[in-house]
Image (cartoon, grey):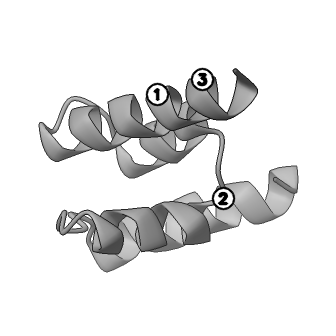
Amino acid sequence: MIQQTKKKEITKALKLYQEGRLSFGQAFTLAKVSPWRFVDLLKENKICLNLDEEEIEKEFDRVAMNSF
C-alpha cells in the first residue's frame, strides 16, 4: 500500500511538472524524493528538465540548507 501511494505521488508529480504546472522544486517535493532522484525519474520517463542554471542552483541550494 505504501509503495503504491509513493508511486502515485511520483506519477502525479511527473505529470504536473511535464505540463508546467509545478516547478522543479514543487515537483520533487510532491514526489517526496531528492532532486537528484527526481532528475533520474525525469530521464527514465523521457521528460525534459526545464530549468535554467539559476533555477538549478536555487533548488539544489534550498535542498542542501533543509537537508532532504
SS at mark 1 in the image: helix
Front disc: 2 or 3 = 3
Query: Which residue is the site of mark 2?
Result: 34
SS at mark 3 in the image: helix
The spot of residue 4 in percent (x, y) is 58, 28
Residue drawn at (27%, 66%) of the image:
51
The part of the image, by quadrant, that contains residue 2 is: top right
Relative side of 5 to 56, left or right: right
Relative side of 10 to 49, left or right: right
Front disc: 2 or 1 = 1
Quarter the N terminus occupies: top right
The part of the image, by quadrant, that contains residue 62 is: bottom right
Residue drawn at (58%, 71%) of the image:
36
Label 2 neighbour load within 10 Å: few <14, some 14-19, many 20+: some
**Amino acid type of the residue that numbered disc 2 sits on in the rendered structure:** Ser
**Amino acid type of the residue that numbered disc 3 sits on in the rendered structure:** Thr
Query: Which residue is the site of mark 1?
Result: 8
Q: Residue furthest right?
A: 67
Query: Which residue is the site of mark 3?
Result: 5
The spot of residue 37 in percent (x, y) is 57, 66
Of pointers 2 and 1, the one earlier in the residue sequence: 1
Q: CA distance from mark 2 to mark 3?
A: 17 Å
Residue drawn at (45%, 73%) of the image:
40
Question: Residues at badges 2 and 3 in contact (C-beta under 8 Å)?
Answer: no
Q: CA distance from mark 2 to mark 1?
A: 16 Å
The spot of residue 15 in percent (x, y) is 23, 37
